[in-house]
Each structure stands twice: as C-alpha cells, then as structure tokens.
Amino acid sequence: MSEGGPSVHATAVKVGQIAVLIRGPSGSGKSRLAFDLIMAGRSGVLERAVLVGDDRVHLATVGNEIEVRPAPVLAGLIEIRGLGIRRCDFVEHATVGLVVDLDAQDAERLPAAESLKTSIFGVEIPRIPVSRDYSPLPLVVAALTTTKS
C-alpha cells in the first residue's frame, strides 16, 4: 500500500463491503448524500452504511484496489447542513467500489458506457455522473441494488 496516500476533496461511505466515494465541488451535496446513504442503511433500504470520511479522505492503492481512509483530523465528523459539524460512527478504511461525481458535466439520461467508469491510480471503478438538478440517492441505491439488463 502506498504510504497514507494523497488527500482528496471527497466524502466516502462504506455500504456493505464497498465504499462509495463521493466527489464534487464545494456545496454540491457530498455530505448530504453521505448522510442519506447512512440513513438508507439504517432503514434497511441498503446494507449497513457507515461513514469513512467527510470532506477530505486519503486514497491509496492496495494491490489492484483503491483504499479510502478518513483524514485523521476529520475522522468521525460529518457536516449536516443546518446543524453544523456532528460526530458519528466511522470506519478506518474501506475499498472503493463506486464513485459518484456530483454536478458532473457528462451526466445524461442514458449515459454512454465510458462515462459509467473512472480510473483512479490506474484502477477502473464503476462511476455514476449526477447532474446538478438530480437527486443522487436514487441513482446510488439503484446502482447498489440492481444489475444491468
């Protein structure tokens, strides 16, 4: 594994056995989607979901996978708009299995196959591009609970 890995502006939630890495500009809803995923896990819509890190996370290669870890100073903290910074359960690391790009310029109703994957450090990972005017939670739930027809 690379030492610590670079810090990136993103949020991550472990859902079941994989982490959902949420990227996007400031104010795009990364923390909101993270909390929505945690609540979906608590309600049984998804497998158990727990925060990895909010706002800044570290990425590293482990074999042919990407591991995500919280930034140490932010571990266990999440921003809840209207409430401020809150403490919650978190995990120390998880393997990234899905990337969600909020405010994505290439988001389409029927996306091209090449837009549904991304590469991080040479590792190809499934990706969901989400436009600014669309709620990301249903897309992520669908990606995690359905198969392509």
Image (cartoon, helix red, strand yellow):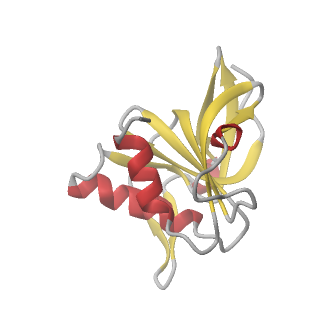
Residue positioned 77% across, 28% down in the render = 121
Task: Say whether residue 49 is left or right of residue 120.
Answer: left
Residue 115 is situated, as x and y percent measured from the top left of the image, at 69, 44
Residue 80 vertical position relative to residue 116 in the rendered view, above or below: below
Q: How many marks?
A: 0
Q: In front here: 58 or 108?
A: 108
Residue 89 is situated, as x and y percent measured from the top left of the image, at 38, 52
Residue 35 vertical position relative to residue 126 in the rendered view, above or below: below
Residue positioned 30% across, 48% down in the render = 46
Task: Say whether residue 125 is left or right of residue 47.
Answer: right
Residue positioned 36% across, 48% down in the render = 49
Give the quadrant of residue 64.
Answer: top right
Task: Say whether residue 111 is left or right of residue 3.
Answer: left
Residue 35 vertical position relative to residue 13 in the rendered view, above or below: below
**Residue ranking furthest to the bottom:** 82
Q: In front here: 10 or 77?
A: 10
Report the quarter where the C terminus lies: top left
**Residue ranking furthest to the top:** 63
Report the quarter where the N terminus lies: top right
Residue positioned 54% across, 65% down in the render = 31
Give the quadrant of residue 131.
Answer: bottom right
Tell me if residue 88 can be seen: no
Q: In front here: 111 or 90?
A: 111
Residue 132 is situated, as x and y percent measured from the top left of the image, at 64, 71
Tell me if residue 2 can be seen: yes
Residue 92 is situated, as x and y percent measured from the top left of the image, at 50, 38
Residue 30 vertical position relative to residue 23 in the rendered view, above or below: below
